[in-house]
Image (cartoon, helix red, strand yellow):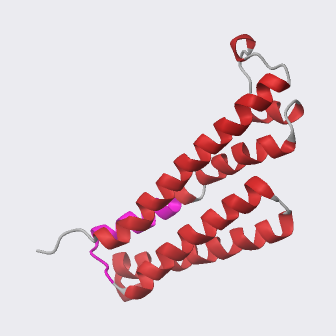
């Protein structure tokens, strides 16, 4: 019996790793910005993520916004790719799609964290979403057979 497709799990681990890179980047940017803005974490009670948008510079917040984005749609990517790996799907096209999704999410992150012009950022998001749709269809064909 073949084992789970490790090659298909590599993009999953890579995107989790990238998400942690963004977490450390946001901490390295946001904590100094909080100190500079006079925010005292020990005095904060019941704040929401958007509250920081009112007191911190946008460029410091961009990393935090992107980190939150990496905890939203990519969750669907993780599930779909894990389903494909459990089904032992091992074809070149599926691996290219999975790595394509990760690549576009990383480029989206770098763009949002540095330049953050919305137009190009939207296209990067749209392309990664289209790739996610393709992966989902691929998983649907495998799970439901060709009656999907």
Q: Quadrant of the N terminus?
A: bottom left
51 relative to 76, above or below: above
Residue drawn at (78%, 41%), measured in percent from left and top? 60
Residue drawn at (66%, 66%), measured in percent from left and top? 107
Front residue (pair 146, 123): 123
Residue drawn at (44%, 66%), measured in percent from left and top? 11
Bounds of the magenta segment: 76-90
Q: Main secondary structure of the magenta part?
A: helix
Which residue is outermost to the top? 43
- Whether residue 136 appears in this view of the structure is no
Q: Quadrant of the C terminus?
A: bottom left
30 drawn magenta: no
Front residue (pair 52, 28): 28
Front residue (pair 120, 134): 120
**Looking at the rendering, which quadrant does residue 7 occupy?**
bottom left
Residue drawn at (54%, 76%), measured in percent from left and top? 100
| Rendered location of residue 76, percent (x, y) | 52, 60
């Amino acid at each position: 019996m073949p084992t789970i497709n490790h090659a298909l799990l590599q993009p999953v681990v890579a995107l989790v790793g990238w998400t942690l890179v963004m977490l450390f980047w946001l901490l390295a940017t946001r904590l100094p910005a909080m100190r500079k803005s006079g925010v005292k974490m020990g005095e904060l009670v019941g704040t929401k993520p958007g509250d920081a948008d009112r007191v911190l510079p946008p460029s410091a917040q961009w990393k935090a916004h992107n980190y939150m984005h990496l905890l939203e749609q990519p969750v669907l990517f993780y599930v779909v790719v894990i389903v494909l790996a459990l089904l032992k799907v091992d074809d070149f096209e599926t691996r290219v799609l999975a790595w394509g999704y990760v690549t576009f999410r990383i480029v989206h992150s770098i763009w949002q964290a540095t330049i953050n012009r919305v137009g190009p950022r939207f296209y990067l998001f749209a392309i990664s979403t289209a790739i996610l749709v393709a992966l989902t269809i691929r998983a649907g064909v495998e799970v439901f057979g060709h009656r999907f």
